[in-house]
Amino acid sequence: MTDSKYFTTTKKGEIFELKSELNSDKKEKKKEAVKKVIASMTVGKDVSALFPDVVNCMQTDNLELKKLVYLYLMNYAKSQPDMAIMAVNTFVKDCEDPNPLIRALAVRTMGCIRVDKITEYLCEPLRKCLKDEDPYVRKTAAVCVAKLYDISSSLVEDQGFLDQLKDLLSDSNPMVVANAVAALSEINESSPTGQPLVELNTNTINKLLTALNECTEWGQVFILDSLANYSPKDEREAQSISSEAAGNHSHTNEIASIISELREAGLII
Protein backbone atom coordinates (compact mmCIF):
# COMPACT_ATOMS: atom_id res chain seq x y z
CA MET A 1 0.00 0.00 0.00
CA THR A 2 1.31 3.47 -0.84
CA ASP A 3 1.62 6.50 1.44
CA SER A 4 -1.66 7.83 0.00
CA LYS A 5 -3.45 5.99 2.81
CA TYR A 6 -2.22 8.66 5.21
CA PHE A 7 -4.07 11.37 3.31
CA THR A 8 -7.50 9.80 3.35
CA THR A 9 -10.37 11.51 5.13
CA THR A 10 -10.46 10.60 8.80
CA LYS A 11 -13.48 9.97 10.96
CA LYS A 12 -14.66 11.89 13.99
CA GLY A 13 -12.36 11.61 16.99
CA GLU A 14 -9.23 11.73 14.83
CA ILE A 15 -7.13 13.73 17.32
CA PHE A 16 -8.05 11.43 20.20
CA GLU A 17 -7.13 8.33 18.20
CA LEU A 18 -3.86 9.82 16.99
CA LYS A 19 -2.98 10.82 20.53
CA SER A 20 -3.49 7.24 21.66
CA GLU A 21 -1.40 5.85 18.81
CA LEU A 22 1.42 8.35 19.39
CA ASN A 23 1.72 7.10 22.95
CA SER A 24 1.67 3.45 21.95
CA ASP A 25 4.37 1.13 23.26
CA LYS A 26 4.70 -0.37 19.78
CA LYS A 27 7.37 1.45 17.74
CA GLU A 28 5.80 0.70 14.37
CA LYS A 29 2.37 1.92 15.47
CA LYS A 30 3.94 5.10 16.82
CA LYS A 31 5.76 5.72 13.51
CA GLU A 32 2.55 5.16 11.55
CA ALA A 33 0.79 7.67 13.82
CA VAL A 34 3.45 10.33 13.21
CA LYS A 35 3.10 9.76 9.46
CA LYS A 36 -0.65 10.36 9.77
CA VAL A 37 0.01 13.56 11.73
CA ILE A 38 2.43 14.84 9.09
CA ALA A 39 -0.02 13.96 6.33
CA SER A 40 -2.79 15.90 8.10
CA MET A 41 -0.45 18.84 8.62
CA THR A 42 0.55 18.76 4.94
CA VAL A 43 -3.06 19.13 3.75
CA GLY A 44 -3.69 22.03 6.12
CA LYS A 45 -5.34 20.34 9.10
CA ASP A 46 -4.55 21.75 12.54
CA VAL A 47 -2.82 19.04 14.53
CA SER A 48 -1.03 21.41 16.92
CA ALA A 49 -2.94 19.91 19.84
CA LEU A 50 -0.73 16.83 19.46
CA PHE A 51 2.49 18.82 20.03
CA PRO A 52 3.52 17.21 23.36
CA ASP A 53 2.68 13.74 22.08
CA VAL A 54 4.71 14.18 18.90
CA VAL A 55 7.64 15.68 20.82
CA ASN A 56 7.71 12.60 23.04
CA CYS A 57 8.38 10.57 19.90
CA MET A 58 11.73 12.34 19.48
CA GLN A 59 13.32 9.88 21.88
CA THR A 60 14.11 7.32 19.20
CA ASP A 61 17.10 6.02 17.27
CA ASN A 62 14.92 5.55 14.17
CA LEU A 63 16.16 8.18 11.70
CA GLU A 64 12.97 8.16 9.60
CA LEU A 65 10.78 8.77 12.63
CA LYS A 66 13.10 11.48 13.96
CA LYS A 67 12.99 13.30 10.61
CA LEU A 68 9.19 13.30 10.69
CA VAL A 69 9.08 14.63 14.24
CA TYR A 70 11.59 17.37 13.38
CA LEU A 71 9.47 18.32 10.37
CA TYR A 72 6.46 18.70 12.66
CA LEU A 73 8.47 20.81 15.08
CA MET A 74 9.66 23.18 12.35
CA ASN A 75 6.05 23.76 11.37
CA TYR A 76 4.54 24.35 14.80
CA ALA A 77 7.39 25.59 17.05
CA LYS A 78 6.81 29.26 16.26
CA SER A 79 3.12 29.08 17.18
CA GLN A 80 3.87 26.96 20.25
CA PRO A 81 7.10 28.49 21.64
CA ASP A 82 6.50 27.39 25.22
CA MET A 83 5.86 23.82 24.13
CA ALA A 84 8.89 23.89 21.81
CA ILE A 85 11.15 24.23 24.85
CA MET A 86 10.25 20.61 25.59
CA ALA A 87 12.35 19.57 22.61
CA VAL A 88 15.53 21.41 23.62
CA ASN A 89 17.08 18.62 25.70
CA THR A 90 16.59 16.12 22.89
CA PHE A 91 18.07 18.55 20.36
CA VAL A 92 21.17 18.97 22.50
CA LYS A 93 21.41 15.22 23.03
CA ASP A 94 20.99 14.53 19.30
CA CYS A 95 23.82 16.95 18.50
CA GLU A 96 26.11 14.48 20.29
CA ASP A 97 24.58 11.31 18.85
CA PRO A 98 27.06 8.72 17.46
CA ASN A 99 25.27 8.91 14.10
CA PRO A 100 26.49 11.97 12.12
CA LEU A 101 23.21 12.06 10.20
CA ILE A 102 21.32 12.61 13.45
CA ARG A 103 23.82 15.23 14.62
CA ALA A 104 23.43 17.13 11.35
CA LEU A 105 19.65 16.76 11.40
CA ALA A 106 19.47 18.17 14.92
CA VAL A 107 21.59 21.24 14.25
CA ARG A 108 19.80 21.92 10.95
CA THR A 109 16.38 21.74 12.60
CA MET A 110 17.42 23.94 15.51
CA GLY A 111 18.55 26.54 12.99
CA CYS A 112 15.20 26.42 11.21
CA ILE A 113 13.12 26.85 14.37
CA ARG A 114 12.82 30.61 14.67
CA VAL A 115 11.98 30.79 18.35
CA ASP A 116 13.97 33.17 20.55
CA LYS A 117 13.62 30.94 23.58
CA ILE A 118 15.32 28.11 21.72
CA THR A 119 18.02 30.18 20.03
CA GLU A 120 20.07 30.61 23.19
CA TYR A 121 20.21 26.85 23.63
CA LEU A 122 21.54 26.42 20.09
CA CYS A 123 24.91 28.08 20.71
CA GLU A 124 26.83 25.29 22.44
CA PRO A 125 25.60 22.45 20.18
CA LEU A 126 26.34 24.61 17.12
CA ARG A 127 29.83 25.40 18.38
CA LYS A 128 30.55 21.68 18.73
CA CYS A 129 29.06 20.83 15.34
CA LEU A 130 31.22 23.44 13.60
CA LYS A 131 34.22 21.44 14.85
CA ASP A 132 32.65 18.02 14.37
CA GLU A 133 34.86 15.21 13.08
CA ASP A 134 32.37 14.48 10.28
CA PRO A 135 32.41 16.89 7.30
CA TYR A 136 28.67 16.42 6.70
CA VAL A 137 27.96 17.78 10.17
CA ARG A 138 30.41 20.67 9.72
CA LYS A 139 28.93 21.74 6.40
CA THR A 140 25.42 21.59 7.85
CA ALA A 141 26.50 23.64 10.86
CA ALA A 142 28.04 26.26 8.55
CA VAL A 143 24.67 26.94 6.94
CA CYS A 144 23.07 27.00 10.38
CA VAL A 145 25.27 29.98 11.34
CA ALA A 146 23.70 32.01 8.52
CA LYS A 147 20.21 31.05 9.70
CA LEU A 148 21.08 32.00 13.25
CA TYR A 149 22.48 35.33 12.05
CA ASP A 150 19.13 36.09 10.44
CA ILE A 151 17.46 35.50 13.82
CA SER A 152 20.03 37.29 15.99
CA SER A 153 23.07 38.88 14.36
CA SER A 154 24.37 40.13 17.71
CA LEU A 155 24.31 36.61 19.15
CA VAL A 156 26.34 35.25 16.22
CA GLU A 157 28.92 38.00 16.58
CA ASP A 158 29.13 37.78 20.38
CA GLN A 159 29.50 34.00 20.35
CA GLY A 160 32.36 34.11 17.84
CA PHE A 161 30.54 32.10 15.19
CA LEU A 162 31.73 34.36 12.37
CA ASP A 163 35.34 33.54 13.22
CA GLN A 164 34.53 29.84 13.29
CA LEU A 165 32.86 30.18 9.91
CA LYS A 166 35.94 31.90 8.51
CA ASP A 167 38.10 29.09 9.90
CA LEU A 168 36.07 26.62 7.84
CA LEU A 169 37.42 28.26 4.68
CA SER A 170 40.58 26.29 5.45
CA ASP A 171 38.70 23.01 5.94
CA SER A 172 40.07 19.91 4.24
CA ASN A 173 36.65 19.05 2.82
CA PRO A 174 35.60 21.07 -0.29
CA MET A 175 31.89 20.94 0.54
CA VAL A 176 32.55 22.38 3.98
CA VAL A 177 34.51 25.20 2.34
CA ALA A 178 31.70 25.79 -0.17
CA ASN A 179 29.05 25.92 2.55
CA ALA A 180 31.18 28.29 4.61
CA VAL A 181 31.49 30.59 1.58
CA ALA A 182 27.74 30.36 0.97
CA ALA A 183 26.95 31.15 4.61
CA LEU A 184 29.34 34.11 4.69
CA SER A 185 27.85 35.42 1.44
CA GLU A 186 24.33 35.19 2.87
CA ILE A 187 25.39 36.93 6.08
CA ASN A 188 27.20 39.60 4.11
CA GLU A 189 24.05 40.42 2.16
CA SER A 190 22.04 40.99 5.32
CA SER A 191 24.82 42.74 7.22
CA PRO A 192 23.96 46.41 7.96
CA THR A 193 27.55 47.51 7.37
CA GLY A 194 27.76 46.01 3.91
CA GLN A 195 31.47 45.40 4.50
CA PRO A 196 32.91 42.07 3.30
CA LEU A 197 33.23 39.64 6.19
CA VAL A 198 36.26 37.94 4.68
CA GLU A 199 39.32 39.74 3.42
CA LEU A 200 40.25 37.84 0.30
CA ASN A 201 43.99 37.38 -0.04
CA THR A 202 46.28 35.04 -1.94
CA ASN A 203 46.07 32.39 0.79
CA THR A 204 42.25 32.45 0.90
CA ILE A 205 41.97 32.48 -2.88
CA ASN A 206 44.18 29.39 -3.16
CA LYS A 207 41.94 27.55 -0.69
CA LEU A 208 38.84 28.50 -2.65
CA LEU A 209 40.42 27.40 -5.93
CA THR A 210 41.35 24.05 -4.39
CA ALA A 211 37.79 23.49 -3.23
CA LEU A 212 36.35 24.72 -6.54
CA ASN A 213 37.44 21.66 -8.51
CA GLU A 214 36.17 19.18 -5.93
CA CYS A 215 32.83 20.46 -4.63
CA THR A 216 29.37 20.22 -6.23
CA GLU A 217 28.02 22.65 -8.81
CA TRP A 218 26.00 24.37 -6.09
CA GLY A 219 29.18 25.05 -4.15
CA GLN A 220 31.05 26.15 -7.26
CA VAL A 221 28.55 28.94 -7.87
CA PHE A 222 29.24 30.54 -4.47
CA ILE A 223 33.00 30.11 -4.78
CA LEU A 224 33.05 31.59 -8.27
CA ASP A 225 30.96 34.49 -7.06
CA SER A 226 33.51 35.16 -4.32
CA LEU A 227 36.38 34.93 -6.80
CA ALA A 228 34.62 37.50 -8.99
CA ASN A 229 34.76 39.99 -6.11
CA TYR A 230 38.52 39.66 -5.73
CA SER A 231 40.93 42.15 -7.26
CA PRO A 232 44.21 40.43 -8.17
CA LYS A 233 47.37 42.29 -7.17
CA ASP A 234 48.91 41.98 -10.62
CA GLU A 235 48.49 40.46 -14.07
CA ARG A 236 50.40 37.33 -13.14
CA GLU A 237 48.04 36.54 -10.26
CA ALA A 238 45.02 37.33 -12.44
CA GLN A 239 46.16 34.89 -15.09
CA SER A 240 46.91 32.25 -12.48
CA ILE A 241 43.41 32.55 -10.99
CA SER A 242 41.81 32.43 -14.43
CA SER A 243 43.84 29.35 -15.34
CA GLU A 244 42.95 27.55 -12.11
CA ALA A 245 39.26 28.43 -12.41
CA ALA A 246 39.16 27.42 -16.06
CA GLY A 247 40.43 24.02 -15.04
CA ASN A 248 36.87 23.32 -13.91
CA HIS A 249 34.69 23.12 -17.02
CA SER A 250 31.30 22.62 -15.40
CA HIS A 251 30.62 26.35 -15.03
CA THR A 252 32.12 27.95 -18.12
CA ASN A 253 29.66 30.86 -18.06
CA GLU A 254 30.64 31.94 -14.56
CA ILE A 255 34.32 31.48 -15.36
CA ALA A 256 33.94 33.51 -18.54
CA SER A 257 32.31 36.26 -16.51
CA ILE A 258 35.24 36.35 -14.07
CA ILE A 259 37.76 36.48 -16.89
CA SER A 260 35.74 39.25 -18.55
CA GLU A 261 35.78 41.32 -15.35
CA LEU A 262 39.52 40.82 -15.00
CA ARG A 263 40.01 42.01 -18.57
CA GLU A 264 37.82 45.05 -18.00
CA ALA A 265 39.98 45.89 -15.01
CA GLY A 266 42.98 45.76 -17.31
CA LEU A 267 44.58 42.97 -15.33
CA ILE A 268 44.68 40.44 -18.17
CA ILE A 269 44.69 40.77 -21.96
Image: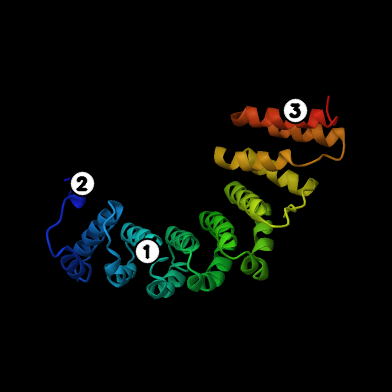
Position in image of residue 25 (x %, y %): 19, 71
Marked residue nearer the N-terminal end (1 or 3)? 1
Circles 3, 2 touching at the beta carbon (< 8 Å): no
Residue 17 is left or right of residue 48, and the answer is left
- The amino acid type of the residue labelled 1 equals Tyr
Residue at point 42%, 65% (across, down): 78
Position in image of residue 69 (x %, y %): 34, 62
Residue at point 69%, 57% (across, down): 192
Q: According to the image, label 1 marks what residue?
A: 76
Q: Secondary structure at mark 1?
A: helix
Q: Secondary structure at mark 3?
A: helix
Q: Quadrant of the C terminus?
A: top right
Circles 1, 3 touching at the beta carbon (< 8 Å): no
Residue 83 is left or right of residue 245, and the answer is left
Marked residue nearer the N-terminal end (1 or 2)? 2
- The amino acid type of the residue labelled 3 equals Ser
Circles 1, 2 touching at the beta carbon (< 8 Å): no
Q: According to the image, label 2 marks what residue?
A: 4
Q: In the depicted view, which residue is nearer to us: 88 or 152?
A: 152
Q: Residue extending furthest right?
A: 234
The answer to whether residue 243 is visible is no
